[in-house]
Amino acid sequence: MLLFARNDLILILLVIAATIATPIVLRLRRRSHAQFLQDFSDTEICDHLRPALSLLKSRGHRILRVGQVRPNMPLEIHIAPPFDPRKLAEELKLADPVFVSDRNVLYCRQDWCEIRPQSP
């Protein structure tokens, strides 16, 4: 009969506990990150683009990423599923300083902020 040492038994129990806890922790982490993206985008979006973001959220769009690539670049809010920025700008009658850029994103040149549809 093989007997486990006390340290081996503790190690086995810790591995089992970690295996059970990992999916739970990852699910909670994803949920908290999604909430952080919602809250961060709501506070950091400029007033010129706020109506567009509110309308997209009311239509069921979700925020995938928010951030800046570098400090001298605009704040990017990536949204899924894709939408047509030109139609949205016409629908909301967005005026200067907001425009649809060559990259097909809603961009506010005054506050360096953009709403970008997810690439298909």
Image (spheres, rainbow, N blue to C red):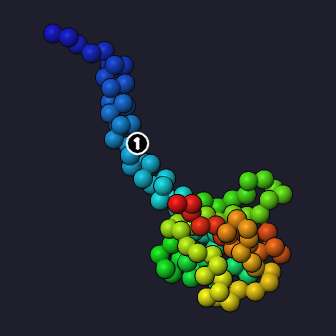
Q: What residue type is labelled 1?
A: Thr
Q: Is residue 37 visible?
A: no
**Relative to 27, 1 lies left or right:** left
Residue farthest along the left direction in this orientation: 1
**Relative to 110, 52 lies left or right:** left
* Quarter holding residue 73: bottom right
Assess disc 1: are there few (<14), some (14-19) or many (≥20) residues with their C-alpha within 10 Å of its C-alpha.
Answer: few
Q: In which quarter of the image is the N terminus?
A: top left
Q: Is residue 34 above or below residue 15?
A: below
Residue nearest the viewer, comparing 17 with 90: 90
Helix or strand or loop: what does disc 1 sit on?
A: helix
Identified at 61% across, 88% down, the residue is 91
Where's residue 76, x and y in %? Answer: 69, 63
Identified at 27% across, 15% down, the residue is 4
Label 1, on which residue?
Answer: 22
Residue farthest along the top direction in this orientation: 1
Where's residue 119, x and y in %? Answer: 57, 60
Identified at 77% across, 75% down, the residue is 108
Residue nearest the viewer, comparing 10 with 39: 39
Q: Is residue 69 above or below residue 118?
A: above
Identified at 60% across, 59% down, the residue is 65
Where's residue 3, x and y in %? Answer: 23, 13
Q: Is residue 53 visible?
A: yes
